[in-house]
Image: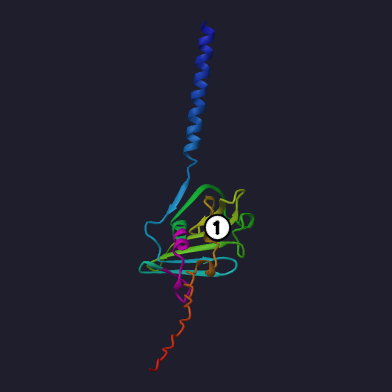
Amino acid sequence: MKARKLSLLIACAVLLVVCVVQGIVKSSDKVKYFTLKDSPERITIQTPAETVLLTKEGESWFVGEEKLAAKESEVNQIVEGISSVKALDKVASKTEKTSAQYELGEGKTIVVTAVKKGKTVRTVEIGKDATTSSQCYITVDGKNDIYLAGGNLKRIFNKTQEDLLQPAPEPVEEEPVEEETAATVEL
């Protein structure tokens, strides 16, 4: 009976040690959020195809230097995406080799820059998708750390100027009005 109690106590002690070790390892493996306190007033999205400028004036967002009206829903997604970036894990440090591996080099990267009061408050470089399209590799604020980011950042930020323009209202076709001719009746 003593041997059985002793083996149970040893098994409990081993399980306790395993739980403590896992708790320590998991506590260092936390998701990191890069958040902005204030909403940006200008966002530049540089894709391999083009550069798109979004500018906020009052409560409205505009696209390009011409300041054309922007789609509110699309811009809201972009503002939310740049204001809170979810980094699941650091995967590497940026070197020439890792930049090529994670497609964080010129010609393949999407670079999103947020500006508030003339000062850059966030820059995110978006590289290739991970094994799932809802994750990709990024760097934040010019640092050398490469993160696996949660959320489909490429879908949010890979936009053209045309994608962000508010569609022009369709012209209303007026039906031709037939002129009634007044007939004069002679008596």
Residue 124 magenta? no
Image quarter in which the C terminus is found: bottom left
Q: Name the residue rendered at 49%, 15% in the picture.
A: 9
Please provide the residue range marked out in magenta. 61-77
How many numbered badges does the structure rendering display? 1
Of the residues shown, which amino acid type is indicated by label 1? Arg
Residue 74 magenta? yes
Kind of element beneath mark 1 = helix
Q: Provide residue 124's location: percent of width, then percent of height.
A: 50, 59
User: Is 117 placed above or below 150 here?
Assistant: below
**Furthest-left residue in view?**
58
| Residue nearer the viewer, 75 or 169 | 169
Q: Provide residue 179's location: percent of width, then percent of height.
A: 45, 85
Q: Is residue 41 left or right of residue 2?
A: left
Q: Provide residue 50's location: percent of width, then percent of height.
A: 57, 70
Give the residue pinned by disc 1. Answer: 155
Mark yes or no: residue 144 visible.
no
| Residue nearer the viewer, 89 or 63 | 63
Q: On the image, which quarter does residue 100 sit in?
A: bottom right
Q: Is residue 117 left or right of residue 110?
A: left
